[in-house]
Image (tube, grey):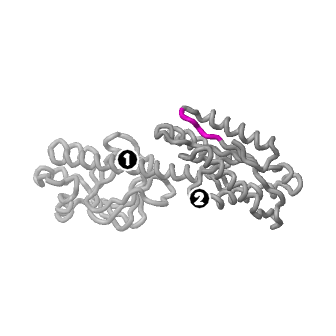
């Protein structure tokens, strides 16, 4: 690393940077004599996480990438001519919290900590500019946090899918049912719940193996989707059970929908892992509607009781 003094051109460029905007040259000329020039090649690291830092850098030319981790997959921001870097670790007395790397050849002014504080004391404009830089840094950090939260929520959405059936999973269902119940109650709208159980699933596993049982679960789930309108709120409840939430749909209509799905599965051809058709795949279905004031657990119990009646009534039927 080679350091040299500022020349007249460097000083002129420095006065055009964010930190020195509206700062009188004569008020800081003596302070600037203590600053030095640092040059970086492409890919050279200026700052590393957890290192101590006692300098603020002003970019005269070139640009710097800022990364939050060592993988350096994507920079969180890019700093260009006129911008500063390193001020946060000076102001809070902590270690560097990011990795700063030259994106292209860079020419920087390096200002030691004591010179920065001297400048702030002699120049009101410089102090205001520093506050402006810090405010922008905080806004940028807030935006990064918001973006990461949005990304996390996106991952959670992907994580709510059951890999075997392709439907939503139990976690999604547990979260969604309570929300939709509350929404429908406030709007004075009905909500129905359909609970589905495969008939003779144990016999499929025993006769054809667990791989065939997995194919049966996947095939039935896809048959349910294929016989439904887009936007079906369906989930794999566990094992060979499925649930469907029907907001703003009353019991009679929900029962008709459930029976259409039952018939669709009964008429579907579902293949095992050897591409042989699995025989006799049918569904028992229980349907319940949530009257005003019905809680989540009450609705589940009502749908489960209806499913029990369908099983005991001979299977391959819908009960409510």
Segment tinted magenta in the rendering = 288-292
Q: Residues within 10 Å of mark 1 (few under 14, many from 20)?
A: few
Q: Quadrant of residue 273?
A: bottom right
Badge 2: residue crowd in 10 Å (few <14, some 14–19, many ≥20): few
Residue 36: x and y in percent read: 26, 56
Q: Out of 133 and 313, give the one closest to the viewer.
A: 313
Left or right: 203 with respect to 140? Answer: right
Q: Which residue is mark 1?
A: 142
Q: Residue 203: image x %, image y %?
A: 86, 51
Check residue 312 in the rendering and tell me which mark sits there, or answer none: none
Residue 229: give its label: 2
How far apart are the alpha carbons under marks 2 and 1?
A: 40 Å
- From the viewer's perspective, tell me whether residue 49 is left or right of residue 283: left
Nearest to viewer (mark 2 / mark 1): 2
Quarter of the N terminus within the rendering: bottom left
Specify which label sits upstream in the sequence, 2 or 1. 1
Q: Residue at x 55, y 39 (%)?
A: 178
- Asked whether residue 297 is drawn in magenta, I would say no
């Amino acid at each position: 690393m080679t350091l040299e003094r500022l020349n007249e051109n460097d000083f002129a460029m420095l006065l055009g940077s964010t930190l020195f905007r509206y700062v009188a040259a004569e008020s800081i000329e003596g302070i600037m004599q203590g600053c030095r020039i640092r040059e970086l090649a492409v890919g050279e690291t200026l700052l590393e996480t957890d290192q101590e830092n006692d300098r603020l850098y002003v970019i005269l030319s070139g640009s710097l990438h800022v990364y939050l981790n060592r993988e350096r997959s994507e920079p969180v921001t890019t700093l260009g001519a006129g911008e500063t870097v390193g001020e946060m670790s000076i102001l809070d007395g902590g270690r560097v919290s990011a990795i700063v790397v030259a994106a292209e050849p860079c020419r920087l002014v390096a200002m030691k900590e004591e010179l920065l504080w001297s400048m702030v004391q002699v120049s009101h404009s410089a102090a205001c500019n520093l506050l402006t830089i810090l405010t922008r840094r905080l806004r940028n950090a807030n935006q990064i946090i918001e973006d990461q939260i949005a990304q996390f929520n996106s991952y959670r959405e992907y994580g709510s899918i059951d890999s075997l059936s392709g439907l939503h999973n139990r976690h999604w269902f547990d979260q969604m049912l309570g929300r939709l119940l509350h929404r429908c109650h406030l709007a004075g709208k009905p909500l129905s719940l359909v609970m589905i159980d495969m008939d003779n699933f144990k016999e499929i596993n025993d006769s054809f193996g667990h791989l065939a049982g997995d194919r049966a679960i996947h095939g039935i789930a896809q048959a349910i989707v294929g016989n439904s309108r887009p936007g079906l709120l369906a989930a794999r409840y566990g094992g060979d059970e499925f649930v469907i939430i029907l907001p703003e749909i009353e019991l009679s209509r929900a029962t008709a929908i459930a029976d259409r799905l039952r018939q669709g599965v009964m008429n579907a051809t579902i293949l095992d892992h050897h591409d042989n058709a699995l025989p006799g795949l049918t569904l028992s279905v229980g349907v319940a509607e949530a009257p005003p004031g019905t809680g989540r657990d009450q609705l589940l119990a009502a749908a489960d009781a209806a499913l029990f009646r369908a099983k005991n009534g001979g299977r391959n039927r819908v009960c409510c």
